[in-house]
Image: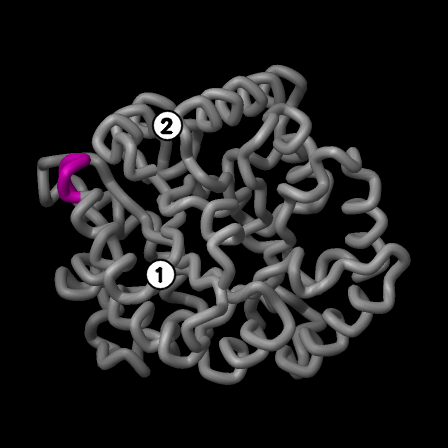
Amino acid sequence: MSSKTRETFGRVGIWSSALHGSRTDDAGRRAIAEAVAELEELKYGTLWIGGSPSVEDAAAVVAATRTVTVATGILSIWDHTAEEVAAGIAAIGAGSRGRFVLGLGVSHGPMVPQYSKPYSAMVGYLDALDAATPPVGPESRVLAALGPKMLKLATGRALGAHPYLVTAEHTAEARAALGPDALLAPELSVVLDTDTDRARTTARNMLAMYLQLPNYTDNLLRLGFSESDFDGGGSTRLLDALFALGDAGRVKARTQEYLDAGADHVALQVLTAEEGGGGLPRAEWRELAKAFGDEL
């Protein structure tokens, strides 16, 4: 990956499903606009709109900011046709379109009635984006890749990969699979809470849903975890491998583990017990920005 692309994404970003403007009212959309403007001022490199967003969700964040990179993390290929996506991207102002990145994924069988041959479906979707007018080429997209086949596809057909719910060990394996040039931008969930038991409870509340999805559990089994690690919302071993739990200094150290393992960029998802793991945790975002300082 070129140094220009690394600078575009920055070392650390914010991942949040609460940046979905289409899921709230006018007051909620104003709150999102204010939050993303502040995140830009705090110098985070990329804002990832989580939870199966649309291009329109991302366009609203682009419009509320000036320079920060905005990415979907992750748009499901089953929810929007490639033609709809291409048209939505074309509608973003020409001066801002270059800082939008399309994150694509195949979602999960239990969540998608029409789920079938996900790898082939992704290949066909990328072909359609290439053929769109105007096209959405590899330089404008990343893939939600966990396993070897999708990682290889991310190398040849996109800027690289945005893996979700992965360990630093997976990051090292993904870097080896991607090679030295592709973008590797894993998500890392964090709980800023020095009460370890409470922090693990917050993490388990978030993790429980994902442990029902085979794409994630299969990946964790490949990494050496066992079925018993999934019991009760996740074993301590699993939680400590997947999350950054503790104060801002601990989050910074865990982020560095992913960077040392080969990540170019780490997207931090802040979970809070008070907001059920979601919301716009602006105080926590500020605290992390202060801890990272000039390293953002």
Q: In the shown orientation, is residue 231 left or right of residue 96?
A: left
Q: In the shown orientation, is residue 201 left or right of residue 276?
A: left
At x 58%, y 61%, the residue is 142
Dot label at residue 294: none
Give the image location of residue 24, x and y in percent.
62, 28
Provide the residue designation for mark 2: 281
Provide the residue designation for mark 1: 263
Position of the C terminus, as image quadrant, is: top left
How are the residues colored?
one colour
Farthest-out residue, front: 3
**Which comes before the other along the chain, label 1 or label 2?**
1
Q: Nearer the viewer, mark 1 or mark 2?
A: 1
Could you say which is closer to the camera, residue 253 or residue 274?
A: 253
Amino acid beneath label 1: Ala
Q: Secondary structure at mark 1?
A: loop
Amino acid beneath label 2: Pro
The quarter of the picture where residue 10 lies is top left
Give the image location of residue 127, x and y in percent.
78, 74
The correct choice, above or below, for 45 with respect to 219 in the image is above
Marks 1 and 2 sit apart, C-alpha to C-alpha, by 25 Å
Could you say which is closer to the camera, residue 166 or residue 172?
A: 172
Start-end of magenta stretch: 246-250
| Residue 78 appears in the rendering | yes
At x 63%, y 42%, the residue is 99
| Residue 214 appears in the rendering | no
Q: Secondary structure at mark 2?
A: loop
Give the image location of residue 206, x and y in percent.
34, 49
Could you say which is closer to the camera, residue 70 or residue 83?
A: 70
Please tell me whether the stretch drawn in magenta is mainly helix, strand or loop.
helix
The correct choice, above or below, for 66 with respect to 206 in the image is above
The correct choice, above or below, for 98 with respect to 211 in the image is above
